[in-house]
Amino acid sequence: SEGLGHYPGTDAPRPPTTAAASPTPSSGKSPFVVYAAEVGYGYVGDEYWTTFSSLTPHWTSQERSMIREWFELFHDRYGGARPTGAWANHFTIISWPITHAVLPVYLQRHLAQLLFDFRGALTSELLDDPRALGTRLAQRATNYTERFRIFCENNTLVGQVAAALLSGENEPTSYLTGPTLARLVEGLSEEQQARRWLKMARASATRLRGFRSGGSAAAVNTTAKRLPHATDPRLVLRRDGAWNAYAELPDLTGPSAGLPKVYDQLRVSRVSVNGGARSIPPSGLLYPGQEVCLVRWPRPDQPFLQLERGDVEINRLLSEWCVITKGPWWLFRHQSTGLAIEVKGKFVRPGHQYVLVGSDTIDKPPVPWCAETAIGAKGIRAYELSVPPRLSESEESALLAAELSVVSHVAIRPVGIVASAWDGEGEAEWLAGEPALLGIKSDLVLRRARIVVDGAVYFLEWTPGEPELLFVLEGLTVGTHELNVALLSHDDRQIASGSLMATIRDPQVRPQGATMGEGIRLLATPSRPTLAELWDDRAVVTIDGPVGTEADLRVTLLDGQGAVLTELHSTLRLPIDKAGWRTTAKAVRTDQRFSDAYDAAESCALAVTRDGVGFAALTCERGFQPLRWRFSRNHDGDAVATLIDQADGGSTTLAFYDVEAPLTAVQMNPAKPFTVPPHGGLVIARSGDAVAATILPTNPNAVINMPPARPVVTSQSNSVREVLHLAEGHQRWIDAALPADAFAAYERQTVGDAIAQAIGMLIGGSHWAAIERKLAHAQEKADYLGDMQNTVGVSTEHKALASTIAFSLYKWLKPEDLLRGFYDAITPSLADYGISGKPAASRFLLLLAGRPGHITEWKPEDASFILERVLKSPVLYRAARFAVLGTRALNDAEGVERSF
């Protein structure tokens, strides 16, 4: 994409000159390939076709597919690049020119920063293998912008560009032509920070180039045992009267970065912990610092971590990544008062204190210094091991029988630069690029040490009279490495041995939410939310900090070039929980400055600061969207909706749903802007797999002077199919993005309530339908609690169930209390109605009664099975609907928003 002509005084590429007014299959292809790629070089992630059309005379949208034909021909004849990755599969046309642009201008700074961040993990092998380098860079790009992550999906291309940029200055490279490389370097050099990043990354690559890690010719056979992984949980014991067991869970951001499906499920799925006192909330494994108490020792025949309702293959991966040490005994070394950390190597040292944990079905080791102690987890017993300075042969044999070993006369430990982690015994951790400096200490008279690392054997001479031998391990790849040491006497006889597990982690860019140990910590659920998720209540933010401390919140909306559109400041009192965030977010959304800038914003930056305490930040992007809605206002205050269509398919459809006819789709022309009705509505644009669904903004001034909207929802038959049809309609409305318009949220809630009411009238029967009609117009719904209770059912059992619900409503105002309480109330009756072996049936009933759109997320066979039973026994639905409407009637506005 070099050597192109430009219009005088502009940076725009000059369109090729052909005999025809517009290109045809018989025209020369190469000039148009170069021209389209040059437009891609200036691409900023928004409206490629708009830019291309404005620069290209006589161009029409019907000719888009010709660009792909040109590039495919260029690929076949001249070996041009072929786009790969999920983005290329979706954008089958524009991915070609953008790929051939090599590195669009707006991504260059990101790549320079990524190379700088990754410089410590570079190896000579990676520099010679662009595809492997690209894969590693893509995994490291987790916390960069979505558009840059999309670029990194083409592993081969990003690896080749990176390898070329990391080549020595003025050195030729086989990955890019000289002019292309010079153009990229020139672009990166225009900004001081990017120039510094590239210079330091290049310096690291120069030092590594030509270096190969390796050992001596000697080698040993290694057994195929599983080494600990960096993603394994860390077991610790804490004493609070009795010992309690805890599992410190891993941050799986790195391992899941190159696996989009895994990352997406981790974002939205709860995680069950084998033996844990609680589940881990969605996104919990995408942050460091998650810990769970073990109320029961993990069962060895079950995975330690599993996603609830997770994909089978993803759960299999999780079971391989996160494994606790194999039993039957687990050894913990006393670290300080009330704390003991697991020794995964299961060796003891004379004169030290340990806690030994094992199954309650096996006997303790027969040594006199092993005494039982209390532990909170079920299924195990714990013993205090006070190892004496000297052990007899029988005592060592007793420990060996329990698969414990005794290590004496040798200690292996990190020295010099502090290791990233060190358990004080046999496991250390470094970040890639850090030197692993180690010392071997012994009180014996030695000749040399034999060191085996990953099967390679090294011999190091021991300096006479020195108590410690120092050495450094270099070139270790990311992962866990076993280091075995044998101390040899002057006749090369082994007189002592020891081992150490060295884990090399691939360092991640510092998470924006801050890390454990900092004064302020910000966590988002789901992790890395989009701009829409953050502001339409699909994501929540919690902010931890010193209790009662005031902190400054800054909310900044930015456009596609990073320019500030608006900035809002407010004061928070820490900590902020989910409810506190919803209140804060609502205040931001209703601010007129925020509403005016929201539709033009491409990203939002949150920053929480307090001098002397800490800082935490979160950046949310709107995300790359092939279909995107934008809104403006006409002189009457009505919203005007325009669809920005960047999809390649050319087959976009547009359906409009009016608030008063929420299940009836009206087909519209997607290419034409349209004036939105005063009450708003729902629009859904589709092109292939791309979908843009949004609730339309209202005209508040007009709505105030109009009667309230009355959604009309009708049903055709009392059947499972009809209930699911209504639930799907409900889901369309609740899943759509919200604009920065408080009235639009109200109209969506009105539609949702109308659809839920229609389901109630369909399933509940005529008497319950009468209650629903009264509630639809009631000013005070609590006045009808008695009517609802009396209408649940007529039998003694039905009345008893209704009475239990009625007396519990005040206890069930929180959704978690409602779920737990309704489960206890309804479960004894479920088997009588043909529902058994379905522990989540009570949750299904509550969702059907209050948020019916969510039942469409259940497995179709499970949803149909329960619905069939509910239609045969409507009392189940009436009980759930009474519980939902009753708790809403007694709750405040915020509680209603969070309820079922």
Image (cartoon, grey):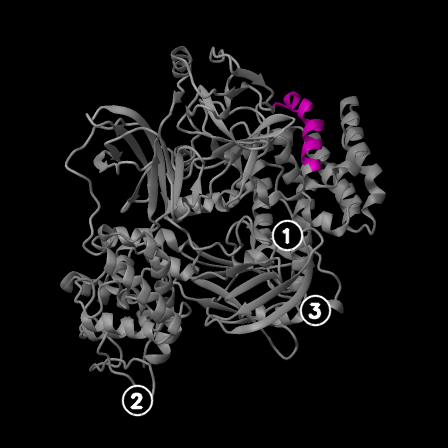
Q: Is residue 277 above or below residue 257?
A: above
> CA–CA distance between discs 3 and 1?
39 Å
Label 3 crowding class (10 Å Cα cut-off): few <14, some 14-19, many 20+? some
**Quarter of the image where the C terminus is located:** top right
Res 749 visible: no
Please give the name of the residue rendered at 28% of the width and 83% of the height, measured from the top-left corner: 6
Q: Which is closer to the viewer, label 1 or label 2?
A: 1
Few, some or many residues within 10 Å of mark 2 (<14, 14–19, 20+): few
Q: Quadrant of residue 492?
A: top left
Q: How many marks?
A: 3
- Look at the image and give the residue range highlighted in magenta: 817-834
Q: What amino acid is at disc 1?
A: Gly
> Does the magenta stretch mainly form a helix, a strand or a loop?
helix
Label 1 CA crowd tier, 10 Å (few <14, some 14–19, many 20+): many
* Mark pair 3, 2: CA separation: 49 Å
Rounded to the nearest angstrom, the CA distance separating label 1 from label 2 is 57 Å
Indicate the secondary structure of the residue bearing disc 3: helix
**Taking 607 as reference, is 883 left or right?**
right
- The location of residue 784, given as percent across then percent down, is 83, 42
Q: Amino acid at mark 2?
A: Pro
Q: Which mark is residue 256?
A: none
Name the residue beneath numbered marker 2: 8
Name which residue type carries label 3. Answer: Pro
Determine whether the residue tagged by mark 2 lies in a helix, strand or loop. Answer: loop
Instruction: Name the residue carrying label 1.
Output: 545
Mark 3 or 1 closer to N-term? 1
- Which residue is denoted by mark 3 in the rendering? 700
